[in-house]
Image (spheres, grey):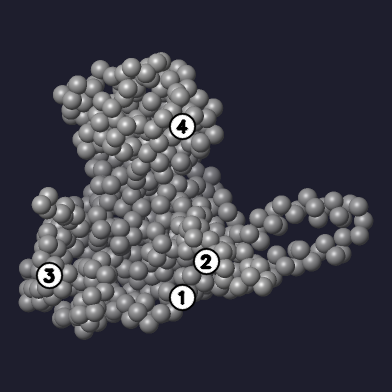
Amino acid sequence: MAAHLSSGRVNLTALREAGRRELREFLDKCAGSKAIVWDEYLTGPFGLIAQYSLLKEHEVEKMFTLKPGRLPQADVKNIIFFVRPKLELMDIITDNVLREDRGRSPQRDFHILFVPRRSLLCEQWLKEQGVLGSFIHREQYSLDLIPFDGDLLSMESESAFKHVANMMIRMKREFPGSQNSIFPVFDTLLLLDRNVDLLTPLATQLTYEGLIDEIYGIQNTYVKLPPEKFAPKKQGEGGKDLPTEPKKLQLNSAEELYAEIRDKNFNAVGSVLSKKAKIISAAFEERHHAKTVGEIKQFVSQLPHMQAARSSLANHTSIAELIKDITTSEDFFDNLTVEQEFMSGIDTDKVNNYIEDCIAQKHPLIKILRLVCLQSVCNSGLKQKVLDHYKKEILQTYGYEHILTLNNLEKAGLLKSQTSGRNNYPTIRKTLRLWMDDVNEQNPNDISYVYSGYAPLSVRLAQLLARPGWRSIEEVLKMLPGPHFEERQQLPTGLQKKRQHGENRVTLVFFLGGVTYAEIAALRFLSQMEDGGTEYVIATTKLINGTSWIKSLMEKLEPAPF
């Protein structure tokens, strides 16, 4: 579960620059004008490494989405496929290449860039289809850890990647400078397998960023929102000509206001927005008091920043209104009440009336599965008759094809029968203080504010590792799934860090199998605690929420071909 290792601290700017350099080098090998054919899944992660301007500098003139059929018209010398090593994508590429007009002049050169690894299986497949020889360059682009923010890295891998140690060794090798010159700045590496804490992603996140992700889904730092709240209000026009395209916004700490409110409990966001509105309004009023040329000049110089702040405030006020419409609904309140009852240990051992009602009213299946799995985890498994009852109700209401999904949830340990007859969750909850009745949402003093009462088990483990250490919770660690171990890395004397007075220790927390925005908020809260003594950097295989997590375990059935 955990390893204590010293490691060179990942400089996120250097990481992004290393990615750009590797991309530039590949593009320069393909001399002349270029069109990129994108595996659609990769466009978001690549956008965080390199903007379109960088591609244009290297003669990329067109970009297309990978799909079957003839490639679109493009008067370019090179066609480059950016793809994951998946056989179904090789079929589409084969189709594209075979449909190419060999009689056209001049002929176009084909190249393929596998992300993040070359695949012998895929190359063999292309060879069997007779098209492998069409590719002049066949290379790989190691898109391992994508910098999402100043303290957040993600692999955006669809399935958990188990060889993190190998990946970090390779990254160290790829950075310029000899290994001996890298001073270890990470004092601790904490590897947390998602299986250790199956509970946290199932609960509804209650931070501002967490709720945006729960309701609208954040993809590669971007969110798409209903457009009507963002339409400029013009007098006398009523509701005509409302925009129909979703409003797309980027969300990261480069935006001052977002950095301030993203990790707050949603109930604390309104007061911050109203305070900001007063400050911005007062700043614009200053223009009436600017009399001298110097004062006017100063006001004008501040104008772009003030206008950006006003636009940012308008956007986040609209988002907060959209979220409030959901969080003040009866259905949201009822769902949250049941979640919190389970997490605080109330009625976890019997069939829940609210879940039964939701199934009867055919609420979305993912909502039902999240609640049933949450109840199962909070009871160390369900009594067999309770589990059988839920299964029967779900299959009768939503269709028997979902038996495969239920089977996947059982294999993942999210849904199971209580084999030992003993529920360990109350002991874990009390020892790790996972439920706090007196949570302060406005001015929090504990990580439990991110779920309005529930402290994420994963983050509590990180907190206790820093102080007083895991020896204090040895018995509880034995109750958690999987082994836990600690390992110390011996360093040459010259590389041992001399800590300055008051300097924080730095811990890299690597979540294998995904992390939620609420967990990230809780770790940032610990970083900012005055007496905490530890700064956290977060890395993960994927950014997840309960819906995307359950979806990844749902079996997609293809319709019958007749």
Q: Label for residue 62?
A: 4
Mark nearer the N terminus (4 vs 2): 4
Q: Label 2 sits on what residue type?
A: Glu
Confirm or deny contact between disc 4 and disc 2 (CB under 8 A): no
**Residue 138 percent across, percent down from the top left:** 31, 22
Q: CA distance from mark 4 to mark 2?
A: 32 Å
28 vs 149, nearest the viewer: 28
CB atoms of marks 1 and 3 within 8 Å: no
Question: Where on the picture, by quarter, is residue 282?
Answer: bottom right
Type of amino acid at the residue the image marks with label 1: Asp
Dot 2 or dot 1: first in sequence order is 2
Q: Is residue 333 visible?
A: yes
Query: Mark 2 or mark 3: which comes first in sequence?
Result: 2
Q: Position of residue 510 (x, y in %)?
A: 34, 48
Residue at 44% in and 63% down: 212
Q: Is residue 178 left or right of residue 13?
A: left
Question: Label 1, label 3: how many angstroms apart (C-alpha)?
Answer: 32 Å
Mark 1 lies on residue: 325
